[in-house]
């Protein structure tokens, strides 16, 4: 009888191979399977970057130290690494509970999302960024500066790794990408809230806000591509408003298109259209009219929807507006078209209604103040009245 070929089980293979239940050759940084299949490759033992990261097989010296001290050797932990651990602890103990007003969702943010972050570094940086912002929000001014700097560092690292992946969503990375997409608004607006430098001064916050809209629009595309995989995973209860655009087309919501709140704004749009005879931002008069009208209708429908749902879902519905307007309206915003900026001021009014969410507190007022400084004087009477 021929001898049975011996099989050596791989205990330290990459996460992708483990999920696919195939043998991994453990080549670093990318194994041969992931190289061949062009998949993302990461290893479970690399959790947080820094010199304190260790293999699952400690050296004899560290094993001896562990036996004497009762825990692993921490002598190599740097100040930067310790800060990351502090932030991750704050996320699990405090920040995670602010991500939802639904008790059943808290465990997902506190545990499941963190587990996904160990295999996807962009998500880990996102969690650390928002945790730093949360600590800064609660801290006294001297510490607030330190935590804001930490938040900026992790924010930049998260987006540098996250944005390129939006164009290559797959069944392995979709869950982490989806979780990160829910952090993007908090990371961006939280920095606007805490930072006092020129980048986030009232005169510039408008441009910063408009710039963040591109990222929020990319999120909706990612969710559309990966939602069937997400529905089958452990984060499926978090999807919630994945069919938001369909909901907003329902008769229950479109019936509010003639609501009193936004009727005057629509009338303003129609009354100023003769001024757009030559178009704007490379768009024709009719294209401008369609872009303005849809933007106002989406604001109206989202306001109607937000009055029917809970606080955090209300936040998600309001922040969906940039993803639901036409691309032509974003072009008009970037061109700082006065009517587009007037409509943006009514979005700012919606943000004011979310002031009880810590990372949105004060953002609506600051945005509106910035708009007041940019809009020509003759347009100021149309500006949203935010007290």
Image (cartoon, grey):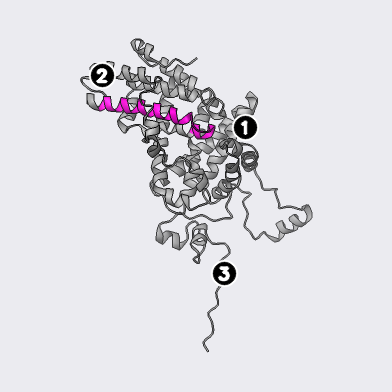
Q: Any mark on residue 144, and which?
A: none
The local secondary structure at tag 2 comes to helix
Circle 3 — which element? loop
Query: Residue 113 location, x and y as percent?
Result: 56, 46
Magenta range is: 287-315
Mark 2 or mark 3: name the one nearer the start of the chain: 3
In three-dimensional space, the C-alpha distance between marks 2 and 3, rounded to whole angstroms, equals 70 Å
Toward which corner of the image does residue 333 lie, by quadrant? Answer: top left
298 part of magenta stretch:
yes
Q: Is residue 283 visible?
A: no
Q: Is residue 34 above or below residue 353?
A: below
- Locate residue 81 relative to residue 354 in the image: left or right: right
In terms of depth relative to the viewer, which is nearer, 223 or 139? 223
Spatial CA distance of label 1 from label 3 is 43 Å
Dot 3 crowding, Cα within 10 Å, few <14, some 14–19, many 20+: few
Residue with the mark numbered 1: 135
Give whichever of discs 1 and 3 has the lower sequence position: 3
- The question of residue 213 being in magenta is answered with no
Reply above or below: 126 against 140.
below
Identify which residue is drawn at 51% across, 38% down.
183
Find disc 2 in the rendering and name its residue. 273
Taking the image as drawn, is residue 254 in sight? yes
Q: Is residue 122 above or below residue 65?
A: above
Residue 311, how many percent across, how many down? 54, 31
For label 1, the SS is: helix
Q: Earlier in the sequence, mark 1 or mark 2?
A: 1
Q: Which mark is residue 9?
A: 3
Residue 78 in the figure: left or right of residue 385: right
Report the front residue among 13 and 63. Answer: 13
């Amino acid at each position: 009888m021929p001898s049975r070929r011996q099989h050596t089980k791989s205990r330290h293979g990459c996460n992708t191979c483990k999920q696919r239940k195939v043998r991994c050759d453990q080549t670093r940084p990318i194994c041969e399977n992931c190289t061949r299949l062009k998949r993302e490759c990461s290893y479970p033992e690399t959790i947080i970057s820094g010199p304190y990261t260790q293999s699952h097989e400690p050296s004899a010296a560290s094993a001896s130290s562990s036996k004497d001290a009762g825990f692993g050797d921490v002598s190599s932990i740097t100040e930067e690494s310790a800060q990351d651990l502090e932030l991750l602890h704050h996320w699990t103990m405090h920040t995670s509970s602010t991500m939802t007003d639904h008790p059943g969702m808290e465990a997902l943010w506190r545990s499941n999302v963190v587990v996904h972050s160990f295999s996807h570094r962009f998500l880990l940086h996102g969690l650390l960024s928002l945790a730093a912002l949360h600590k800064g929000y609660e801290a006294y001014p001297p510490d607030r500066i330190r935590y804001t700097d930490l938040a900026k560092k992790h924010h930049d690292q998260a987006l540098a790794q996250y944005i390129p992946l939006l164009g290559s969503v797959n069944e392995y990375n979709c869950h982490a990408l989806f979780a990160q997409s829910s952090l993007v608004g908090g990371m961006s607006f939280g920095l606007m809230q805490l930072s006092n430098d020129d980048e986030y001064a009232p005169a510039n916050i408008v441009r910063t806000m408009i710039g963040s809209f591109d990222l929020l629009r990319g999120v909706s595309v990612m969710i559309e591509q990966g939602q069937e995989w997400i529905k089958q995973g452990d984060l499926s209860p978090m999807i919630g408003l994945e069919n938001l655009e369909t909901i907003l087309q329902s008769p229950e919501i479109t019936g509010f298109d003639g609501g009193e709140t936004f009727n005057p704004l629509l009338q303003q749009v129609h009354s100023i259209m003769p001024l757009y005879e030559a178009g704007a931002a490379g768009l024709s008069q009719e294209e401008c009219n369609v872009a303005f009208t849809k933007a106002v209708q989406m604001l109206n429908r989202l306001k109607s929807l937000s009055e029917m749902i809970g606080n955090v879902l209300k936040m998600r519905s309001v922040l969906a507006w940039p993803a639901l307007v036409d691309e032509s309206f974003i072009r008009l915003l970037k061109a700082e078209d006065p009517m587009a900026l007037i409509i943006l001021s009514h979005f700012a009014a919606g943000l004011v209604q979310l002031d009880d969410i810590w990372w949105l507190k004060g953002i609506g007022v600051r945005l509106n103040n910035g708009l007041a400084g940019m809009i020509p004087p003759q347009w100021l009477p149309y500006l949203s009245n935010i007290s």
